[in-house]
Amino acid sequence: MKFSYWEIKTWLSNIDFVIIGSGIVGLNCALELRLKHPKSKIVVLEKGLVPYGASTRNAGFACFGSLTEILSDLDSHSSLEVYELIKKRVSGLRRLRNLLGDKQIKYKQLGGNEIFLENDTEKLHHSLAKINEINELMEPLFNNKVFKLSRNTFNFKNTLDEIIFNKFEGQIDTGEMMDSLLNNVYKANIKVINNVSVENYEDLGSSVQVCTDQFSLSCNKLFIATNGFSEAIIQEKVVPARAQVLITKPIKNLRAIGTFHLQQGYYYFRNIDDRILLGGGRNLDFQAENTSQFGITDSIQSKLEQLLTDVILPETNFEIDQRWSGIMGIGNKKTTITKQLSNNVYCGVRLGGMGVAIGTNIGAELANLI
């Protein structure tokens, strides 16, 4: 398609900064660039109708890791590395809330609950043996103990009577968060072009040539914020990881209020609009779920429904309303990749399933690389 003089002049020329990806990282990068460079021309390229990937498809947990997740991280990270990971998540959530406001994103600190199935007694005992150690590790961040043993009062079935409770965990409305971020971007005179897929780019030294499936453009600096889709355009090791989700229709007298974790975070659920939103199951087939293709599978969806029937909503009539998936970016470490790739190209990717918690900070860090 041939573009008009007006289209080229307004959207596709004299660009200072191009950002690929309008998710949490990309939009926060754009906003930080506007603060640092108030007169610059900033363009965000997005391949979806709305932000694609995980930013609008996550469960809306304002969390920094359940106790068993943190203990699992200590198997592959040092105590200092785990502390820094949690610190970045806590800092990122505070920055997100300060930027958008709790009312706007419907933030509710209802607490997080780690549930243990009947055959998880050994896992619970191991967690309790380590709870003081983890609380001591995290105390400088909260000036308080984070995790404590509590009673399971949610009428779940086939679970232990004890749970691990974390009063500092909350939940947000993911759609409201992204809508608010986009509104801030528009108000800051940052242009977002949707339905455009970047195929490749070339750093020419004095500028960057960006080629999409519809047009090419030139910019001074390029920022890549594509997370789980990054391997298509950069060489950094980012493994795509699909997360499948379902949500029920409204349920009367719903008692499961808050956020919930099962089996080291591989399953997670929460209340939203009198419904249960449940996701996870990637551990059933890691190889198949390490994909950048959206979709749902019978095996994982069946497991999620089984959890609803046997554990979360026993003896409760419910109907599934919607099913979807999102694409995360992971690696052998949970640290992000925020770096300069060439003279004029930078990336902020591999958020490890913690985009809500760290995306705001990573976006700002990405912008501040120049």
Image (cartoon, rainbow, N blue to C red):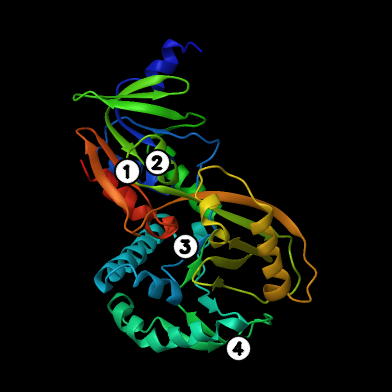
Question: Residue flagged by tag 2: what amino acid is it?
Answer: Ser
Of tags 2 and 3, the one toward the viewer is 2
- Which of the two labelled residues, at mark 3 and mark 4, occupies the earlier sequence position? 3
Residue for point 76% across, 71% down? 252
Residue 135 position within the rendered picture, expressed as x and y whole percent measured from the top left: 35, 83
CA–CA distance in space, label 4 to label 2 = 43 Å
Q: Secondary structure at mark 3?
A: helix
- Which of the two labelled residues, at mark 4 and mark 2, occupies the earlier sequence position? 4
- Which of the two labelled residues, at mark 2 and mark 1, occupies the earlier sequence position? 2
41 vs 269, left or right, is left
Q: Secondary structure at mark 1?
A: loop
Residue for point 49% across, 49% down? 178
Q: In which quarter of the view is residue 343 placed?
A: top left
Residue 137 position within the rendered picture, expressed as x and y whole percent measured from the top left: 30, 79
Q: In which quarter of the view is residue 41 placed?
A: top left
Residue hosting label 1? 236
Residue hosting label 4? 161
Please say if 284 is above or below 225: below
Q: Secondary structure at mark 2?
A: helix
Image quarter where the C terminus lies is top left
Query: Are dots 2 and 1 in contact, CB under 8 Å?
Result: yes
- Which of the two labelled residues, at mark 1 and mark 4, occupies the earlier sequence position? 4
Residue hosting label 2? 230
Observer able to see residue 254: no
Residue hosting label 3? 102
Question: Residue flagged by tag 3: what amino acid is it?
Answer: Asp
